[in-house]
Image (spheres, grey):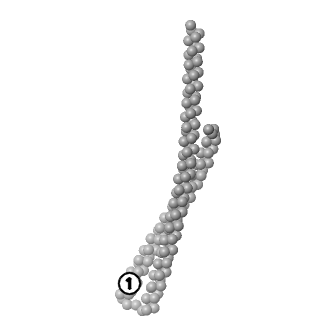
Amino acid sequence: MASQSQLDTLIELAQTASDETAKRLGAALRVTQENQEKLQMLNGYRADYAERFDAAMAAGMTPMAYRNFQAFLDKLDLAVKGQQQVLLQAQQRSERERSNWQDSERKRMSYTTLSNRAQQQAQQAEAKRDQKAMDEHAARQAYYKR
């Protein structure tokens, strides 16, 4: 079994790795949230513009104004689709980072468990040594009192 200092070193390294993956996960989650908000903003803007288009159509508009409105709506649709792709990629990155963080936490916890077991075994061995010493002392005391 590895010595306690070796386990402590492994735990420190695993903790550092876990901290780094947690930072990357946090950054990925922030990017995902920002992209979600941008998509909601684009969808809202597109809905508002579509309402304006419908109102202008009801009021009557020139063919040129109709083409301009329609071209801009097409551009907004393209922007929404692009933002959906960006959001999907950000979500996938977040999932990868979450998986990486879980792996590093699992590793850190494994080392911690090993360390705890080693400490328990050392304590048990110490208790056995203490008990043996006490038994030997009591036996010597009993022998000399006879």
Question: What secondary structure is found at the residue carrying circle 1?
Answer: helix
Depth check, front residue: 9 or 50: 9
Q: Quadrant of the C terminus?
A: top right
Report which residue position mark 1 lands on.
54
**Residue 24, relative to residue 73: is it above or below?**
above
Amino acid type at image mark 1: Asp
Q: Position of residue 15 (x, y in %)?
A: 58, 48
Q: Quadrant of the N terminus?
A: top right
Q: Position of residue 137 (x, y in %)?
A: 58, 17
Residue at point 42% right, 74% down? 44
Residue at point 48% right, 64% down? 33
**Dot 1 crowding, Cα within 10 Å, few <14, some 14–19, many 20+:** few
Q: Residue furthest left?
A: 58
Q: Position of residue 26 (x, y in %)?
A: 53, 58
Residue at point 43% right, 88% down? 66
- The answer to which image quadrant residue 138 occupies is top right
Q: Position of residue 29 (x, y in %)?
A: 51, 61
